[in-house]
């Protein structure tokens, strides 16, 4: 009887399914598939939104808008959280480029409400201002003027008499006194007329103010001179050049200004004969009237 019972139990066990592990394996594969689908979905970015976010961060770091140091950010120096300013009020903060935060809404990003920078500013496609265009036009004219005068000096072998330099105040054209005048005198010499006529033709279309400045060395005028001192002589020489442009060439008087500086602005050492010679000069400065914005 016991043996029959044992055989019956053994016979029942043989009918249990042997492939139950496949159910677990199928569940695992399904879960892995779902996991990778989710990971792929998370890795797919909206490129347009990503560009806007990165552009906003770049604009924030580039503008240097203060967040911790008493500016228009969340924290105001040592005062903790800053109270919002009253309507029409001024919180005293300014962005790194000098723009008042009260105008830009306290965010440092002008032209974009709510602090979101405009896409045009991010991409650098904002058109230049009228001042910037005027500055570029002026610089182009000054560069062209310098190139023309430099070529004229080289073509006519006047390198020792006329010097051209680009200075912060404008294009400086330096004329030696030996090229323009006899010693101790302020009347222009005829050989200087062609060069002055060439300059007058360039000045007529430059659209800028021109300063004519007379300079001498530190040697006093001779006792029999018609000029009282070097101030008188340097001013008379600058005036002679101005009169040539106005009377002989008919240029606009409103374009010019003149001054005599005597020996107060030496370009070289007056202790040497060469230095004194180079200090006796007339400078024509085509003034740079627009300055580049910082």
Image: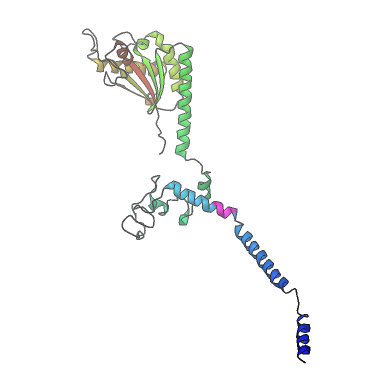
Estimate the x, y position of residue 133 in percent, counting from the top left. 48, 36
Q: Quadrant of the C terminus?
A: top left
Image position of 53 (left or right of 219): right
Asked which quadrant contains residue 23, the reply is bottom right
**Most distant residue in the left direction:** 223
Estimate the x, y position of residue 97 in percent, counting from the top left. 40, 44
Asked which quadrant contains residue 255, the reply is top left
Estimate the x, y position of residue 101 in percent, counting from the top left. 39, 51
Is 268 rendered above or below residue 138?
Answer: above
Estimate the x, y position of residue 91 in percent, counting from the top left. 34, 54
| Residue 272 sits inside the magenta stretch | no
Dominant secondary structure, magenta: helix
Total numbered circles = 0
Q: Is residue 48 visible?
A: yes
Q: Is residue 251 visible?
A: no
| Residue 49 sits inside the magenta stretch | yes
For the rendered model, the colour scheme is rainbow
Q: Nearer the viewer, residue 174 or 80?
A: 80
Q: Nearer the viewer, residue 15 or 114?
A: 15
Q: Residue at x 46, y 34 (%)?
A: 134
What residue span does the magenta drawing correspond to?
47-51
Q: Residue at x 48, y 48 (%)?
A: 58
Q: Quadrant of the N terminus?
A: bottom right
């Amino acid at each position: 009887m016991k043996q029959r019972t044992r055989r019956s139990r053994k016979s029942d066990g043989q009918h249990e399914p042997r492939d139950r592990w496949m159910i677990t394996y199928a569940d695992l594969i399904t879960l892995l598939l779902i996991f990778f689908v989710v990971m792929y979905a998370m890795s797919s970015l909206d490129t347009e939104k990503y560009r806007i976010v990165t552009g906003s961060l770049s604009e924030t770091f580039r503008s240097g808008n203060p967040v911790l140091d008493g500016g228009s950010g969340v924290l105001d120096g040592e005062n903790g959280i800053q109270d919002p300013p009253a309507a029409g009020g001024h919180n005293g903060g300014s962005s790194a480029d000098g723009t008042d935060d009260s105008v830009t809404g306290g965010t440092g990003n002008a032209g974009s409400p709510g602090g979101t920078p405009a896409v045009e500013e991010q991409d650098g496609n904002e058109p230049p201002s009228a001042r910037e265009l005027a500055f570029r036009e002026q610089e182009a004219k000054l560069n062209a003027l310098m190139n023309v005068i430099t070529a004229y000096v080289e073509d006519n072998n006047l390198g020792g008499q006329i010097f051209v330099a680009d200075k912060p105040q404008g294009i400086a054209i330096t004329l030696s006194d030996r090229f323009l005048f006899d010693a101790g005198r302020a009347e222009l010499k005829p050989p200087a007329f062609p060069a002055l006529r060439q300059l007058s033709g360039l000045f007529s279309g430059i659209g800028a103010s021109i300063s004519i400045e007379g300079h001498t060395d530190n040697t006093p005028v001779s006792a029999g001179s018609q000029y009282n001192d070097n101030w008188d002589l340097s001013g008379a020489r600058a005036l002679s050049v101005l009169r040539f442009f106005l009377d002989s060439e008919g240029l606009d008087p409103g374009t010019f200004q003149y001054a005599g500086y005597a020996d107060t602005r030496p370009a070289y050492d007056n202790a040497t004969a060469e230095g004194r010679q180079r200090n006796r000069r007339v400078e024509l400065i085509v003034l740079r009237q627009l300055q580049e914005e910082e």
